[in-house]
């Protein structure tokens, strides 16, 4: 996982709700769901992602 996403992940408490604005490929929200049980949602406006 990218260093910046790892730093963000370390700040998120388990089993919380997360809204990732500009989530790109969704790597962070997928990781939070799998490892911390978060209800993670993402919004990406760039159709290329």
Image: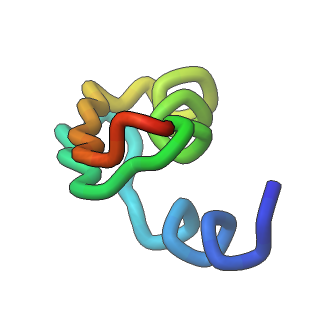
Q: Is residue 2 above or below residue 23?
A: below
Q: How many marks?
A: 0
Q: Residue at x 54, y 46 (%)?
A: 28
Q: Is residue 45 left or right of residue 32?
A: left
Q: Residue at x 43, y 24 (%)?
A: 37
Q: Quadrant of the N terminus?
A: bottom right
**23 or 7, which lies in front?**
23
Q: Is residue 18 above or below residue 2?
A: above
Q: Is residue 11 above or below residue 36?
A: below
Q: Is residue 42 left or right of residue 24?
A: left
* Residue 6 picture location, percent across and down: 68, 66
Q: Residue at x 19, y 46 (%)?
A: 19
Q: Residue furthest front?
A: 48
Q: Residue at x 23, y 45 (%)?
A: 45
* Residue 27 picture location, percent across and down: 60, 39
* Residue 32 picture location, percent across and down: 50, 38
Instruction: Specify how the rendered protein is coloured.
Output: rainbow
* Residue 25 picture location, percent across and down: 55, 38
**9 or 46, which lies in front?**
46
């Amino acid at each position: 996982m990218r260093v910046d996403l790892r730093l963000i992940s370390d700040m998120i408490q388990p089993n919380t709700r997360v809204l990732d604005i500009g989530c790109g490929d969704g790597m962070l929200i997928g990781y939070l769901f799998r490892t911390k049980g978060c209800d993670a949602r993402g919004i990406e406006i760039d159709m290329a992602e």
